Image (cartoon, grey):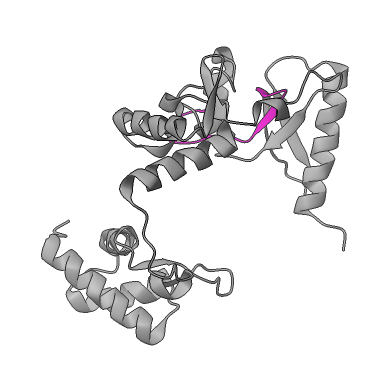
Amino acid sequence: MGLDDDLRQRADYLIRRVLAAHGPLTRAELTEHLTTLGISPDGQEPFHLIRHAALTAVLCHGPQRAGEATYVLLDDWLPTTGGARWEEGAALAELARRYLAAHAPATLEDFAAWSGLPVTWARRAWKLLAESGVITKYGGLTMLAGRVEELPGPSDTPDVRMLPAYDNYLIGYRTREMSVPALHQARVWPGGGLIRPTVIADGLAIATWSRGSGARSIKVNAFEPVPPQIQREVDMEKDAVVRFLRPTT
C-alpha cells in the first residue's frame, strides 16, 4: 500500500494534532484529515494508518457519538499513572498473575497462547511467581496459592452458562479439548476466524446458540440430545439472556 515509515510517522503526527484540536473524531472524520497526506479515502490505507496510531499509543476508542465509535488521544482518555513504570520482569509476572486469577487452573503454555508471548517468557513469569510464593501446583496445572480451597466441589445441579461469541473461556487456553468436545469443535469454530456463542454445561460445550428471528427468541442448537435436568437449566439461561437483551422497563 506504500505506507512506509515516513508516511506512518507523518500520519501519527497528523492524527495526534487533529485529535488534540478537534477530538473526539470518527473514523470517517479522521480519514478526511488523512487525505491531506495524499491518502485515498476509499481504500484500506486510512484503516491501517488509524490502526498504526493505536498500536503506537497515539489514540484509542473514546465515547460513542450517535451510536458510532469515536477516537481520542490515549493520553487524554486514560488516567495518569503518576509516571510509574513497570520493570520488564515485574510486568511479565503481574500479567501472568492476572491471567491465573481469571483462568486457573492452567499451564504456562496456556498463558503463552493466550498472551501471544514466547514460551520462554512464560517460563520466566512462572519462575518469578514461584519464587515469590504466588503460585502452587494443582496436579499438572498451576493455580494461585490459596485458591485451591475455593474450587467448587461436585454439585447435583449442573452449572449451565450461555457464553457470547468469542468468549474468553474459548480462547484463553492453548487447546480446546477441555471446553469443547473434539467431535463438535467445527460447530464452534466453523472457520474464517468465527467463534460462535456456546452453551456450556459443567465447563463443556453442549450447544451453540443464536438470536432468533423474533425480538425475544433464542435458538439453541444442541450437539446431542440434552438430558431433562440440563434442559431446564438451559431454558432458565435463555430466559435470563432474553431479559438482558430486552429489559421490560
Asked whether residue 194 is drawn in magenta, I would say: yes
Which residues make up the magenta segment? Answer: 189-205
Quadrant position of residue 170:
top right
Residue in the image at 18% along x and 75% along y: 37
Judge by depth and name the residue closer to the eye, 98 or 9: 98
Judge by depth and name the residue closer to the eye, 18 or 209: 18
User: Horizontally, is 2 left or right of 12 in the view?
Assistant: left
The residue at the far bottom in this view is 21
Residue in the image at 26% along x and 74% along y: 34
Residue in the image at 23% along x and 71% along y: 11
Residue 51, percent from left and from top: 33, 59
Is 8 situated above or below 233? below
The N terminus sits in image quarter: bottom left
Asked whether residue 84 is drawn in magenta, I would say: no
Is 193 situated above or below 176? below
Residue 25, percent from left and from top: 43, 76
Query: Can the viewer see residue 167 in this picture?
Result: no
Query: Can the viewer see residue 219 in this picture?
Result: yes
Judge by depth and name the residue closer to the eye, 35 or 214: 35
Residue 186, percent from left and from top: 52, 22
Is 87 situated above or below 82? above
Residue 177, percent from left and from top: 54, 17
Quadrant position of residue 123:
top left
The C terminus sits in image quarter: bottom right
User: Horizontally, is 166 left or right of 125 in the view?
Assistant: right
